[in-house]
């Protein structure tokens, strides 16, 4: 039986054919190649070239191998070659904020596929894609969503635009996988990365924390001014504030002993003595504390409080502030959980 060898002149071998031969040689020798990192269009071309090769004479194989080895020897530097690879290489050497943002961008990709990030976006962001992107891109994005989520997004998209998007879905059958991948990458970049913000906490939380540490007169004055300008914002700030008066409605009776354990006895006594002589809400908070600790300890605090003379307003607020500070710290670390206003009647 005669075998016909492929013995083309070196000039007849294209770079693609040579690349296919090198890949075959490496795989035949047990090498491992990450071809999946290439665009699918290049993977397909490589497969076609390799499929076109039958038998090649030894001299041609040696010539291609020598050329490949010479090109490797001439390489002076090997860079990542991709945007994501560059991020991984440089992230540890950049400023912390930029490195964090770049890592977040890299995290958008899962095994080279950006679409899981798009699929997990909240419905509001998916609706924004339908409203802002082209009809064709929107149709592809809608096609990639799970049925239930796609239905919800479609229902919340404007009628005329929804009709145009659904019609465009009929033309998505011929879209190449590589094009779909690139669309997913672009959408993930635009919609999957959280916008960089200057503050870690929301305005309500920041202002609430500040007012927690201010004296009562200042706090009430600020809240009164907010009521006039933005009642809704003022109401949300009040919810973010925790003061001595809030102990009655926000702290569970069973948490009271743990909350005051970290407070110095003299400070606790001064706070209770001041609160018992204050307005009705402050007095109620003091009585609430005394009612939910041991009877012996409560009686001792009452006796010591009765023996205290007049307490300066600043000292009284500082003492009560130590108690509320201890409670806030326990809530922030998860050691206790605040009651919501409507839970008060449910607690025995």
Image (cartoon, rainbow, N blue to C red):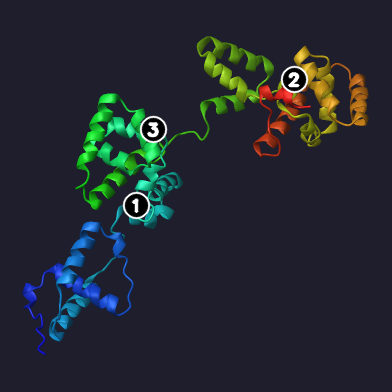
Give the mark nearest the N terminus, 3 or 1. Answer: 1
State the CA–CA distance, disc 3 to disc 1. 24 Å
Quadrant of residue 214 in the image? top right
The residue carrying mark 1 is: 113
Q: Which residue is drawn at the image coordinates 68% and 19% (left, top)? A: 215
User: Which label belongs to residue 43?
Assistant: none
Which of discs 3 and 1 lies nearer the camera? The answer is 3
State the CA–CA distance, disc 1 to disc 2. 61 Å
Task: Give the vertical position of 199 relative to 93 (above or below).
Answer: above
Name the one closer to the observer, 60 or 47.
Answer: 47
Percent coordinates x, y for residue 20 in the rendering: 19, 71
Q: Is residue 187 visible?
A: yes
Which of discs 2 and 3 lies nearer the camera? The answer is 3
CB atoms at circles 1 and 2 under 8 Å apart? no
Task: Give the vertical position of 12 relative to 206 (above or below).
Answer: below
Q: Residues within 10 Å of mark 1 (few under 14, many from 20)?
A: some
Give the mark nearest the N terminus, 2 or 3. Answer: 3
Tag 2's secondary structure?
helix
Q: Which residue is drawn at the image coordinates 11% and 86% (left, top)? A: 3
Quadrant where the N terminus sits is: bottom left
């Amino acid at each position: 039986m005669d075998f016909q060898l492929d013995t083309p002149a070196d000039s007849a071998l294209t770079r693609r054919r040579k690349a296919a031969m090198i890949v075959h040689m490496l795989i035949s020798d047990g090498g491992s190649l990450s071809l999946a990192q290439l665009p699918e269009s290049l993977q397909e071309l490589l497969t076609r070239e390799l499929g076109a090769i039958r038998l090649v004479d030894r001299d041609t194989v040696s010539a291609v191998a020598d050329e490949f080895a010479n090109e490797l020897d001439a390489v002076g530097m090997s860079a990542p070659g991709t945007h994501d690879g560059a991020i991984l290489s440089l992230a540890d050497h950049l400023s912390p904020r930029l490195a964090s943002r770049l890592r977040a961008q890299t995290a958008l990709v899962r095994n080279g596929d950006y679409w899981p990030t798009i699929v997990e976006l909240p419905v509001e962001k998916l609706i924004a894609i339908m409203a802002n992107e082209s009809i064709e891109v929107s149709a592809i994005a809608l096609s990639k969503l799970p049925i239930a989520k796609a239905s919800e997004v479609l229902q919340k998209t404007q009628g005329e635009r929804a009709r145009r998007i659904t019609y465009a879905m009929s033309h998505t059958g011929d879209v190449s996988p590589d094009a779909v991948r690139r669309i997913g990458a672009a959408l993930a970049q635009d919609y999957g990365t959280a916008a960089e913000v200057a503050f870690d906490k929301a305005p309500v939380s920041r202002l609430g924390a500040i007012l927690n540490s201010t004296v009562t007169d200042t706090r009430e004055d600020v809240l009164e001014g907010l009521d006039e300008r933005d009642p809704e914002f003022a109401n949300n700030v009040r919810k973010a504030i925790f003061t001595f008066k809030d102990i009655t409605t926000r702290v569970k009776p069973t948490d009271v002993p743990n909350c005051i354990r970290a407070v110095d006895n003299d400070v606790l006594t001064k706070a209770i003595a001041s609160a018992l002589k204050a307005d009705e809400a402050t007095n109620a908070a003091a009585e609430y504390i005394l009612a939910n600790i041991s009877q012996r300890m409560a009686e001792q605090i009452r006796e010591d409080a009765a023996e205290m003379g007049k307490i300066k307003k600043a000292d009284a607020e500082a003492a009560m502030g130590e108690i509320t500070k201890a409670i806030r710290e326990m809530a922030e670390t998860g050691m206790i959980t605040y009651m919501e206003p409507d839970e008060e009647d449910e607690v025995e």
